[in-house]
Amino acid sequence: MQRLLLNQGWLQSFRFALVGFFIAMSLHGGITVALDDTHDRKVENQGQSVEIISQSPQYSTIPPAQLVQQAEDRYRAGQLSDAIALWQQAAARYETSGDRLNQGLVFSFIAIAFNDLGQQTQAEAKIKQAISLLTAQNSAANSETASVLAQVLTIQGELQLTHGQASVAFETWQAAIAAYRKASDITGILGSQINQARALQADGLYKRAANLLTQVEQSLQNQPDSPLKVTGLRNLGKVLRLAGNLAQSRTVLQQSLAIAQKLQDDTSQSTSEQSGILLSLGNTTRAQGNTDTALDFYQKAIVIAPSLTAKTQIQLAQLSLLIDSNRPAEAQPLFTQIQSQLAQLPPGRLAAYTRINLARSLIKLARDDKTDKTDKDFRLSTSNPSASSTPKFVAQWLQTSAQELAIAIQQIRSSGDSRAESYALGALGSLYETTHQWNDAKTLTQQALSLAQSIDAPDIAYQWQWQLGRIFCQGKQSCPAIGNLHNATIAYAEAVKLLQSLRSDLIAVNQDVQFSFRESVEPVYRQFVELLLQSDGDAPSQENLKQARETIEALQLAELDNFFREACTNTRPVKIDQIDPHAAVIYPIILPSQLAVILALPNQPLRYYKTPVLQVEVERILTQIRQSFRPTAFVEDWLPSTQQVYNLLLRPFAAELATSEIKTLVFVPDGLLRSLPMAALHDGQQYLIEKYSIVLTPGLELLQTQPLERQRLQGLLAGLTQARGGFAALPNVAVEIDQIKSEIPAQVLLDQSFTNGSFEKTIDSKSSPIVHLATHGEFSSNADNTFILTWDGRINVRQMDRLLRSREGKLNPIELLVLSACKTATGDRRAALGMAGVAVRSGARSTIASLWSVGDRSTASLMIEFYRQLRKPEVTKAEALRRAQITLLHQDDYISPYYWAPFVLLGNWL
C-alpha cells in the first residue's frame, strides 16, 4: 500500500512547529502579520464556513496522493477553501480503500486549514477524528502508525497552544514524543521538545523552558550534519529569538546556515532553506538593533528566495525596516518593485496578507512624512480613494494603500477568512484616519472590531479599540466634544483591558520584529492616561485619577514584560496605607504637552497637579541634570535644574507632605524620570534626601511588603578588585567587603573565587538573605546587554534571574540585593528599565543599585555606613540608605551629588 506521510518540507516544518506554524512551513516563517500571528489567537467560527462536497466526478480518476499534493499547492498559495475541498476528496478516497493511516493524516491537514480560517469547531472535530482513526490502528505494534500518530499529535498540540491551552499542548506533545520514540524518530522527538518549551514559556515556566531548550541544542549539536539538523537549528534559533535570547539565537542560526551551505556544496541541494535561515537572521539582528546587518541578511535572502511569494514577503520585511529606520529614499524604489510583483502573485490568503502589510507600511510611511499638511492636503475621496491632492510621494503611498486594501478585501471575502478581513478593514480604517475622513474611518474600524470580536481575537481587537479612540478624538490631543471624550474613553479602556488580558500572549506577539512595543502598546496606555486627566479647569475626578494611576502602573509592568520578552511576574494590588502610614506615593507622568503628577497620601483622596510644559522640554531638563553630575562640576552647574525639577514635581504638595507627617517618598517614575536621582532634588534650602527617605518602584503591585528581619542579617559578599574583561580595577572593593563583613556575618567570594560557577553553587546552597555584589555591571534597555562582571565572564540579567530564583522553594528569599558598582548604559535613554528589571526579576524584596559608576573609595564609604545603620533596630532599609548618603554629602570630598545621589533603593523599603 502506498504510504502518503508528509513530504520532506512539510515533515520538517511540522516536526519543528514553531511560531507561524501553519504558514511558515511554506514561507520560511516570515515576519508579516499574516505569518507570525497565528499562534496567539483564540478563534471560534461565527462567520462564513467552507462548503465541502464529499465526492466530485472531476476528481474521481485522480490518485488520492495527487489530490493531496494539489491541496498542498493550493494551501501554500493561500487558497484554503480549495485546499480543504481537495483534501476532503482525498480523505474520502482513502476511506474507500481502507487506508486509515493516510485518511487520518489528511484529516489533520484539514484541521490546519480550518484553524487558519478561524473555524475552530471544525478544526477540533477533524483532529479528534484523525486521532481516533490512528489510535484504533494499535500504534504500539507498528512504527509506521506510530510515526503518523506522532505527526497528528504534533498538529493537535499546535492547535491547542493556538487557543491558549498551553498545559494541554505540553501533554499532547509529550504523547507525540512517546510515539516518535516508537518510530525511532530522533528528529521528531527534538521538534516536540522545542514545542514543549514554547508551551512552558506560555505558562510562565521560563526556567524549565530554558533548561529544555539547552537540552535540545546539545542534542542537535551531537547530530551529524543533515537537512533535518539544519531545520532544527533554524527553528531553535527562532524560538530563542522569541524568548529574547538574541545573541544565542544569532549563533544558532549562523550554525544552521553554515551547515546548509556545506550540504549544498556536497550534495547540490536547493538554496531555499538558506533563504529562510537568512530571513531569520535578519529578524534576529533587527531585534538586536543592527539595522544595516539585518538589511544585508534580508538582501541575501531575497537573492536566493525560492519563489516570487517568498521573495515578496522578505522584501516587505526589508521595506518595514527601512521605514522604521526613517530611510524613505531607500524605501521608495523597493516599494515600487513590490507593487509591480503583486499582480503576479497567485490569488489567495497569502497574496491578500501581502497587500495588507504593504498598505500598512505605506500608511506608516505617509504618517511619518515630515512635511506639514492641512486636512485638505490629506483627503481621499470615499468613492474614489485614489483621488488626492497630497504631495507627490505621499499621494502615491496613500493611493496604492487604498487600491491594494480594496483588492485584499475582495480576495479575502471569497475565502471566508474573518481574521484577515478584520485586518484589511482595520487597515483601511487607519488609512482614512490618516486622511482625516473620520466617519469613513469610524465605520470601517467598527466593522473590523466586530469581526475580531466574532472570532475572539483580542490581539487584533485591542488595535481597533485603540484606533476607534483616536478617531473619536479626531487626532487631537484633547477630544473636541464631551460625547467624543466619553466614547474615546470607553474605547481606550477596552483596549487597555484587552492588553491586560493578553499579557503572556502579547509577549509572543511582540517578538515579531515588525511589532514595536513603543509604537503598538505603550501609546495605548499613555494616550488613555492623557484622556483620563483631561479636564477644563476642574481637576479630574477621583475615579479618573485612580484609573490613571492604575494604568500607568500597568504600563510599567508591560514595559518590564517587553524587556524580558515574557510576562515577568504575577502581581497583586497593595494599598500604601497597609505598608507604611508615613509614606507617600508620587506618580510623575510625562505627557506630550504637560507634566502631570498624582500624589497618594495615606487615608486621603488622591491629589493632582499639572504643569503645561512640552515633553521635549522636560526631557531636555532631565538630560541636563544628568550631564551636570560629574566630579569636576560646580554647584552652579546642577543646583538650578535640580530646583526646577523639584518645583515641577513636589513644590505644589510640599505643605501637604509636611502636615501628613510623611517620612518616605515612593516614586513610580515614568520614562526618563527613571534615570533621575531624586535624592538630589533641591527645594532651595536642602536636598530632598536630607528631609525624606526615597524609594523607586515600577509599581505598588510589584511590592513584597515584609519588613527586614534584623536577626537574619547575614550575607553573601562577592566582588572584583582586579581589572577584568576590559573594566578597570576596583581596589577599594576589598576594603568595602572587609568592613561589611565586620558588620554582618558573611561568606565572601573575591576575585578568582568569584566565578560564574562558584556564584551559582553558593547562591543555590547558602541561605543568605543579603547578596552584595561589588563588581562592574551595566543596566541597559536591552536585557542581553544588562549584566554583572565575574572573574571568568559575565552573568546577564536572564542568568541572574534563573540563579536567584533557583532558591525558591528551597531557601529563604533574598531580602536585599546590592549592586554597588553597576551603572546605566551611556547614551541609552531607557537604560534604567534594566535596573528595574533586575530588581523585579531577581526575586529580592529590595534592591540597591547605582545610576552611574562612582569611584570605588566613596562607594565603599557609603556601603559600610549603610550596613552600620541597617543593624540598628527600627531603621528601615530606605532610612539606612538615607543616613549613609547624608554622611557622605557632609564630607568635604563628597559634597557633590555625583558621589552620593546615584544610589537608589528599589522595591520594599521597610
Image (cartoon, rainbow, N blue to C red):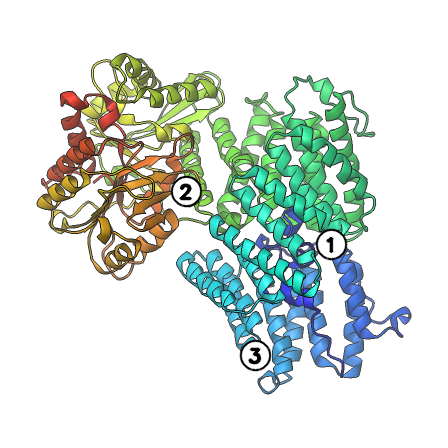
Residue 147 tag number: none
The numbered mark, 2 or 1, whose residue comes first in the sequence reads: 1
What's the amino acid at mark 1? Answer: Pro
Q: Residues within 10 Å of mark 1 (few under 14, many from 20)?
A: some
Rendered location of residue 278, percent (x, y): 62, 50
Q: Are marks 2 and 1 in contact (CB under 8 Å)?
A: no
Position in image of residue 69 (x %, y %): 78, 67
| Residue found at the far front of this picture | 266
User: In the drawing, what numbered circle is on residue 785?
Assistant: 2
Q: Residue at x 29, y 48 (%)?
A: 790
The image shows residue 749, relative to residue 232, as above or below, that is: above
Q: Amino acid at mark 3?
A: Ser
Instruction: State which tag comes first along the sequence, 3 or 2.
Output: 3
| Label 3 – label 2 distance at C-alpha | 41 Å
What residue did someone put label 1 on?
306
Specify few, some or many for label 3: CA neighbours under 10 Å numbering under 14, 14-19, or 20 or more: some
Do the residues under discs 3 and 1 have CB atoms within 8 angstroms? no
Q: Nearer the viewer, residue 331 or 613?
A: 331
Q: Is residue 304 visible?
A: yes
Kindly tell me whether residue 699 is visible in this rendering. no
Distance from the alpha carbon under mark 3 to that under mark 1: 32 Å
Q: Nearer the viewer, mark 3 or mark 1?
A: 1
Q: Residue at x 42, y 56 (%)?
A: 206
Disc 2: CA contacts within 10 A as few (<14), some (14-19) or many (>=20): some
Per the image, the residue denoted by label 3 is: 184
The residue shown at (80%, 77%) is 93
- In the rendered image, residue 32, in percent from the top left (x then y), is placed at 65, 46
